Amino acid sequence: MAVAAAVVAVAPSQAVALATPVPLGAADSFAVLAGQSVTNTGPSVITGDVGVSPGTAISGFPPGLVNGVQHSADAVAQQAQSDLVAAFDNAAGQATDGALPPDAGGLTLVPGVYTASSTLGLTGTLTLDAKGDPNAVWVFQVGSGLTTASASEVALINGAQACNVFWEIGSSATLGTQSTFVGNILALTSISANTGASIDGRALARNGSVTLDTNRTRAPPARAGPRPARPRGPRPARPRGPPRARRQGPPPERPAACWVACWAAL
């Protein structure tokens, strides 16, 4: 009965609007962004840009590999941090569709805005079900810290996409050893990924540091808008040459030699 009550508690209400995408602006190209420092240990692989601002320290690459550009307190990182603040406020300001229990493990959630007033844990598997809609969006509002357990997982089913999942964290996020996490983490303070944790999304920390240890982090492609319609106009007329002149008069007579040859062939 307790489990059933928890599921009902987080079901989105039809009386309120569902989640809307959180625009990341210049932070979209970053897989890892911090305010104070980015520190890596071990052979982490980062697909996307790595940056810090207003801090300057980026360390541990190598042995870590960055499939992107490193930005240390430059104009790009500064703009990304500015846009991260706007994204954080956007996510925090969306009307909630349901309250989360202290641990989200074992839940299956349809698109919506879900709120944890204090801390949020994740043990086991949290499943996000898009119901066949590839544009479905989830926004998680966590009042304090997010902590995922070792080997925990966020699973996407029925068309759900990592680029459409946003985690607004009121303090810091810690990802457990060998855990599999999905979505864009927008943390007010810091983000720590323990050994072997993977992030199919982004680790974006406003004021503190991002600490990595043999992790795989991949910034998902940006949300694709509708394909613009191809302009259709009248087909240009094909150029035509002058009309052929018709032959006038009776057909020319064949020479006698031709008739003889034809008769011989018969």
Image (tube, rainbow, N blue to C red):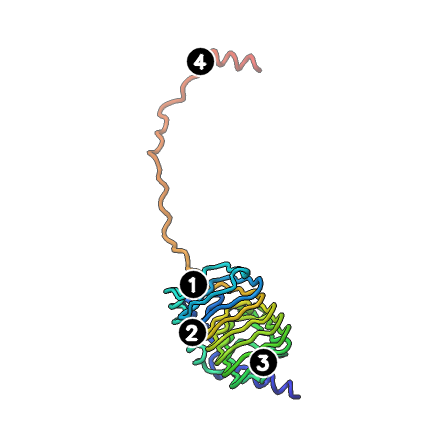
How crowded pointer 3 is (Cα within 10 Å; few <14, some 14-19, many 20+) is rated as some
How crowded pointer 4 is (Cα within 10 Å; few <14, some 14-19, many 20+) is rated as few
Q: Earlier in the sequence, mark 1 or mark 4?
A: 1
Q: Amino acid at mark 1?
A: His
Q: Locate residue 13, reporting x and y percent.
A: 52, 83
Q: Amino acid at mark 4?
A: Pro
Q: CA distance from mark 4 to mark 3?
A: 104 Å
Find disc 4 in the rendering and name its residue: 255
* Label 1 residue SS: strand
Front in this rendered view, residue 226 or 194: 194
Q: Earlier in the sequence, mark 2 or mark 3?
A: 2
Does residue 142 sit above or below 223 in this rendering?
Answer: below
* Label 2 residue SS: helix
Cβ atoms at labels 4 and 3 below 8 Å apart = no
Q: Quadrant of residue 217?
A: bottom right
Q: CA distance from mark 1 to mark 3?
A: 32 Å
Query: Looking at this rendering, what residue extends furthest in the left direction?
Result: 242
Q: Locate residue 253, reporting x and y percent.
A: 42, 17
Q: How many tags in the picture?
A: 4
Nearer to us: label 4 or label 2: 2
Q: Amino acid at mark 3?
A: Gly
Q: Earlier in the sequence, mark 1 or mark 3?
A: 1
Residue ID at (47%, 80%): 17
Q: Amino acid at mark 2?
A: Ala
Q: Earlier in the sequence, mark 4 or mark 2?
A: 2
Cβ atoms at labels 2 and 1 below 8 Å apart = no
Find disc 3 in the rendering and name its residue: 121
Nearer to us: label 2 or label 1: 1
Find disc 2 in the rendering and name its residue: 87
Find disc 1 in the rendering and name its residue: 71
